[in-house]
């Protein structure tokens, strides 16, 4: 379990499947997290079960509030150990948006990625209209590195992907005076 200021990041359990299924019944949540709106409970059970067994290539954790409510998921998908790189993803239940949980969860996982996993780089792509997420990522130290034009089709329109990344020596936690040495 990883602990932030407002959240805990923990392994998924099969008993989390119904909560996770509920998130994917919300169209807006689903569209922002990969467009699996309305997935069956069986599909979500398999998804949760796969997230409950982390491997070198994939670290997927549940985001839990201080009072124990499971509110989202966060993950790193890695390449080879030599690359020291991972792709980042996060999704939070809509009722908990704009309350600082995403920022705290992102910083907590980045701290783990850079300090414990010794990654050199973490990257992500975010849809151009998801400005809330872009602000969160920038607050955590991600920088815009480019844009893939009309890269994804969502809700009847083509959207750009904004490509963002952060390097190990750029990561600063809120209580740090300087970046972690690389």
Image: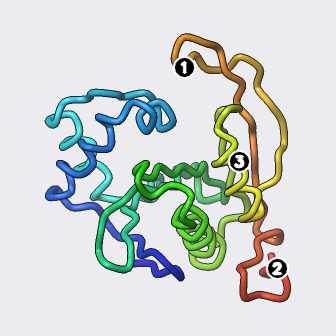
User: Callout 3 environment at 10 Å: few (<14), some (14 to 19), or many (20+)?
Assistant: many
Report the residue at 40% width, 53% height from top: 95
Whole-Å distance between the Cαs marked 3 and 2? Answer: 21 Å
Quickly name the residue at label 3: 134
SS type, badge 2: loop
Mark 3 or mark 2, whichever is nearer to me: 3
User: Which image quarter: residue 170?
Assistant: bottom right
Neighbour tally class for label 1: few under 14, some 14-19, many 20 plus, Cα within 10 Å: few
111 to the left or right of 140: left
Q: Is residue 106 above or below residue 161?
A: below
Q: Secondary structure at mark 3?
A: helix
Of residues 10 and 27, the one drawn nearer to the viewer in this rendering: 27
Mark closer to the observer (1, 2): 1
The dot on residue 154 is: 1
* Percent coordinates x, y for residue 59 in the rendering: 44, 59
What element does badge 1 sit on?
strand
Image coords of residue 23 (percent x, y): 32, 44
Q: Earlier in the sequence, mark 1 or mark 3?
A: 3
Q: Label 2, on which residue?
A: 179
Asked which quadrant contains residue 26, the reply is top left
Disc 2 crowd rating (10 Å Cα; few below 14, some 14-19, many 20+) is few
Q: CA distance from mark 1 to mark 2?
A: 37 Å
């Amino acid at each position: 379990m990883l602990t932030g200021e407002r959240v805990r990041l923990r392994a998924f359990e099969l008993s989390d499947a119904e909560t996770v299924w509920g998130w994917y019944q919300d169209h807006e949540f689903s569209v922002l997290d990969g467009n699996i709106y309305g997935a069956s409970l069986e599909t979500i059970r398999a998804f949760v079960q796969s997230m409950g067994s982390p491997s070198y290539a994939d670290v997927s954790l549940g985001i839990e509030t201080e009072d124990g409510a499971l509110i989202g998921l966060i993950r790193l998908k890695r390449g080879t150990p030599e690359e020291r790189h991972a792709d980042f993803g996060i999704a939070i239940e809509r009722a908990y948006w704009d309350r600082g949980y995403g920022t705290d969860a992102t910083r907590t996982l980045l701290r783990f990625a850079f300090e414990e996993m010794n990654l050199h780089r973490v990257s992500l792509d975010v849809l151009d209209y998801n400005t809330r997420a872009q602000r969160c990522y920038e607050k955590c130290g991600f920088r815009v590195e480019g844009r893939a034009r009309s890269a994804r089709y969502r809700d009847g329109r083509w959207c750009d992907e904004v490509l963002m990344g952060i390097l190990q020596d750029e990561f600063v936690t809120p209580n740090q005076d300087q970046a972690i040495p690389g």
